[in-house]
Image: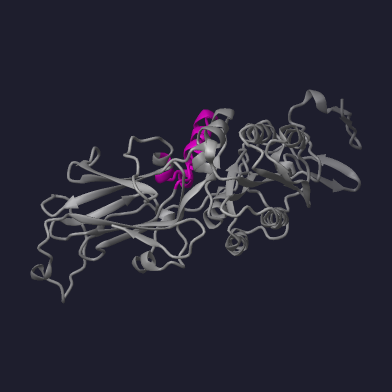
Amino acid sequence: MITISVSGCKSKDMSKDTSWRMISETSCEDQIMDFKTANADWELLDDFDENFNTEEYNAISENGFKSVRDYPLSTFAVDVDTASYSNIRRMINDGAEIVPDAVRIEEMVNYFKYDYKKPTGDVPFSVTTELSDCPWNEDAKLLLIGLQAKDIDLDNRPSSNLVFLIDVSGSMDGPDRLPLMQKAFIMLTENLNENDRVSIVTYAGADDVLLDGVRGNETMKIVEAVEDLYAGGSTAGAQGINRAYELAEKNYIKEGNNRIILATDGDLNVGVSSEGELTRLVKKKKKSGVYLSVLGFGAGNIKDNKMEALADNGNGNYSYIDSLLEAKKVLVDEMGGTLFTVADDVKLQVEFNPTFLKGYRLIGYENRLLNAEDFDDDTKDAGEIGAGHRVTALYELVATDSKQKVVESNLKYQSESELSDSDEWLTINIRYKEPTRDTSQLLS
């Protein structure tokens, strides 16, 4: 029982009053309760909002229709992240209001499996296209572009050099955070072998190395290190990221899978902590050939914008873990896609023929759009595809004979007579790099 006596007032039994809640001043679950001091007396603030929410998301401006005459090329980077779907599911299950900017349509679509044809030959993925009536717009068609990456035999997979970078700050205290994270890493550990290497770095107020390049079959040593973790302190994430890259480079496996798996709620608040600073840090570090994937945990204070930026700029993927089943899906059932990259910097560019189409709208991928000239620029970063991954892109197409109007510019130097006489509606071009290569290949 905790009792506080305030001058001039009766003693207060806090164990019987749920309006009183305290946390360690080193915890950044971010001040469930504030106290202030006046003349050495403690004063209780009764107006605390238990639904206080500090989650952060990047703003999304939904793609609109574009004129084919004005913008004949549509270019974007692929995205295999699925965090949005499981995060939205968490909000629904909690009866919470859905945050509009948390809804990334491409991640909702790519969460599911589709029966696309498997790739053949030396190409890392196949391409499937379908054209149908649009179910929500009778004046438009719906174009599906599906990529299916090749699978790998997990029994003969490349060796992995993994660094578990684990956030153990105060904000990770809670059953849907550190305890769930521990179970997730234990499941992954049980699927490693003697050829793999595992390091563990934790960070709170400072970073700490628990394991350095132990063999993957030293299961009990890894499990014990994970199970002994506890949450507390501030969040110096940049220190942990730097240390994780150091260990990944130290234990680097040539032709292997070298990857940091960052598990966090994204609430970095000490040192380098802004989205821009973290992005620049990871962009610099990824040149080492080490990939960075992110597992998001928790609710109420997650920084989705930072976690997405870290994964996208670290050449990795971003998943949100809301349950043990989701952890199994990401780290066991889809282990190949999560850990083993088959194609880097994958870009799609669709050219539309104005003879047959007057407008189009890319559904989703708002934060993955590229300029037309970026398609042929191998220095421009794009998305990675892991083994067995599927990527789906949907376009809403407006044919020239459709009743739907599409705003276009009144061009002085372009006329119908200059249009191609091709009978094709569109052409799809794809660029990708083989892992660790600097030069892209064109698939058309």
User: What residue is rendered at 61% in x and 61% in y?
Assistant: 288
Name the side, left or right, on which 318 lies relative to 349. right
Rendered residue at 46%/68% (across/down): 379
On the image, the x and y values in percent for residue 172 come to 70, 40
Residue 82 sits inside the magenta stretch:
yes
**Image side of residue 92 versus residue 356, left or right:** right
User: In the picture, residue 7 is in which quadrant?
Assistant: top right
Q: Position of residue 327 (x, y in %)?
A: 57, 33
- Residue 214 image position (x, y, % from top left): 73, 43
Residue drawn at x 18%, y 59% as measured from the top left: 353
Q: Quadrant of the N terminus?
A: top right
Q: Which secondary structure dominates the residues rendered in magenta?
A: helix
Quarter of the image where one finds residue 241: bottom right
Nearer-the-camera pick, 157 or 15: 157
- Residue at the extreme top of the image, as rendered: 16
Which one is in front, 429 or 105? 429
- The magenta region covers 80-108
